[in-house]
Image: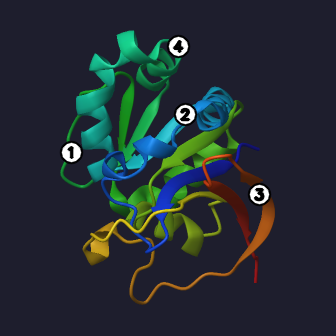
Amino acid sequence: MRKVINSTYVSLDGVIENPQNWTSAYFQEEAAAYAHDLLFSSGALLMGRRTYDGFAEAWPAMEESTGDFGVRMNTLPHYVVSDSLEKGTWGDTTVIRRDDTAAAVAALKEQDGQDILQYGFGDVSRTLVRHGLLDELRLWIHPVFAGTGEPVGMLGAQDFTATFELADQKVFETGVIIATYRAVKR
């Protein structure tokens, strides 16, 4: 069975939105190697609509500057959860309707292949947690207070609770900590 692995950048003050504004100083060789290994151990990308729109706009133009990483981002199957998107515009995209998220992801997990990677933590991630479908949460904790963020751009959300256990951690020379958590099944 395939796993769903969520990889999210987070600041010390819980901000997850616009990581390009506060993470670049910390993305050195160790982080690049880790991100590369994570992406290449995955066989599909799962996203919410906001992440999909940002990635679909940025990644097609980044292959030249990012090499095989960019090629992999653009050529993996993409699954986007959206009620407003009719058809994907970025490579091999399948649209999943919000009401079908749990059943569709459960079916994806049953398929043969590499793990399913999800970037960013939002409504789709919370749905996966509620249905016991998120296998790992990898938080890239950056030693910075971003000082911005609306509730939608924060890691936590009102009326959402979940319990996790620490499964692994990596500490980079830059001070970034990747804490890997697994949901506690109750």
Q: Earlier in the sequence, mark 1 or mark 2?
A: 2
Q: Residues within 10 Å of mark 1 (few under 14, many from 20)?
A: few
The Cα atoms of the two marked residues, 2 and 4, are separated by 16 Å
The Cα atoms of the two marked residues, 1 and 3, are separated by 36 Å
* Residue occupied by mark 2: 44
Q: Nearer the viewer, mark 3 or mark 2?
A: 3
Q: Amino acid at mark 4?
A: Asp
Q: Earlier in the sequence, mark 4 or mark 3?
A: 4
Residue 13 position (above or below residue 89): below
Camera-side residue of 179 and 175: 175
Q: Are marks 1 and 4 in contact (CB under 8 Å)?
A: no
The Cα atoms of the two marked residues, 1 and 2, are separated by 19 Å
Q: Are marks 2 and 4 in contact (CB under 8 Å)?
A: no
* Residue occupied by mark 1: 85
Q: Earlier in the sequence, mark 3 or mark 2?
A: 2
Q: Residues within 10 Å of mark 3 (few under 14, many from 20)?
A: few
Q: Are marks 1 and 2 in contact (CB under 8 Å)?
A: no
Q: For residue 163, which quarter of the picture?
A: bottom right
Q: Residue at coordinates 30% horizontally, 53% vertically from top-left?
A: 18
Q: Residue at coordinates 70% horizontally, 48% vertically from top-left?
A: 3
* Residue occupied by mark 4: 68
The percent position of residue 77, horizontal first and vertical second, equals: 47, 28
Q: Amino acid at mark 3?
A: Gln
Q: Amino acid at mark 2?
A: Ala
* Residue occupied by mark 3: 169
Q: Are marks 3 and 2 in contact (CB under 8 Å)?
A: no
Residue 147 position (above or below residue 16): below
The Cα atoms of the two marked residues, 3 and 2, are separated by 24 Å
The percent position of residue 145, horizontal first and vertical second, equals: 41, 69
